[in-house]
Amino acid sequence: MDRKVKRLLVFYLTSALCCTLVFCGGILADKYASSLLTSYDLFQTIKVKKVNMKEAIKNIDVAIAQVRAEMPRNMSQESTEADILLALDILKSRLKSCTISIDTLEKKDANITLPVTIRGVLSDYHKFMNDLGYLQALKFPFFVIRTMSIDKLEREQKEIVVFEIKGALTMRTNFPGITSGS
């Protein structure tokens, strides 16, 4: 009987070992399956983000093309100064009732700046706001408003409202990635 008990013991131990191995294999297979599903979901997310990135790159390319279309073709220093002076002439023709005074052209880093002071009588608020909007909407060169003041003065027993805008017509002489004359 001792031999029979030993056989049963070996049989039970072998069966227990096999069951343990099958159970551990099931646990490993379950973890592998959940890891595989997580990897698949991550892969799908990456595919969606890849499509979104391609769309964003297309949008960036369109924006760059629009900016390049609006920029002057020749960005050399001489043409930049001429563009600033041309913009000043246009500004003078638009603001005929105002006094426009300028200072000397300043060259700092990659910018050329022409300080401008505009003085006038505020007789038509609507026209004043339109002119101010025009100044802010200038692109090449753009107009930087540094200070603006509106004062009420008395002249000949009559009150008048005067304004003064100090700013600068500014333009870059070169742009990163764009060569002169392109």
Image (cartoon, rainbow, N blue to C red):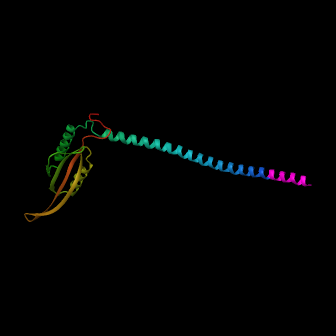
What x and y, as percent, mark residue 159?
13, 64
Horizontal relation, residue 134 to residue 27: left or right: left
Above or below for 115 versus 125: above
Q: Is residue 145 visible?
A: yes
Q: Position of residue 105 (x, y in %)?
A: 16, 45
Q: Nearer the viewer, residue 3 or 93?
A: 3
Instruction: List the single residue furthest toward the bottom.
Output: 157
Residue 105 on the magenta span: no
Is 13 one of the magenta-colored residues?
yes
Is the stretch drawn in magenta largely helix, strand or loop?
helix
Q: Residue furthest left?
A: 156
Give the residue displayed 65% in from the left and 48% down from the top.
32
Residue 94 visible, this orientation: no
Quadrant of the rendered structure where residue 109 is? top left
Residue at position x 15%, y 63% in the image:
152
Q: Quadrant of the N terminus?
A: bottom right
When asked about the image quadrant of residue 129, the answer is bottom left
Q: Which residues are magenta?
A: 1-15
Q: Quadrant of the C terminus?
A: top left
Q: Residue furthest front?
A: 2
Q: Quadrant of residue 166?
A: bottom left
Q: Residue at x 36, y 39 (%)?
A: 65
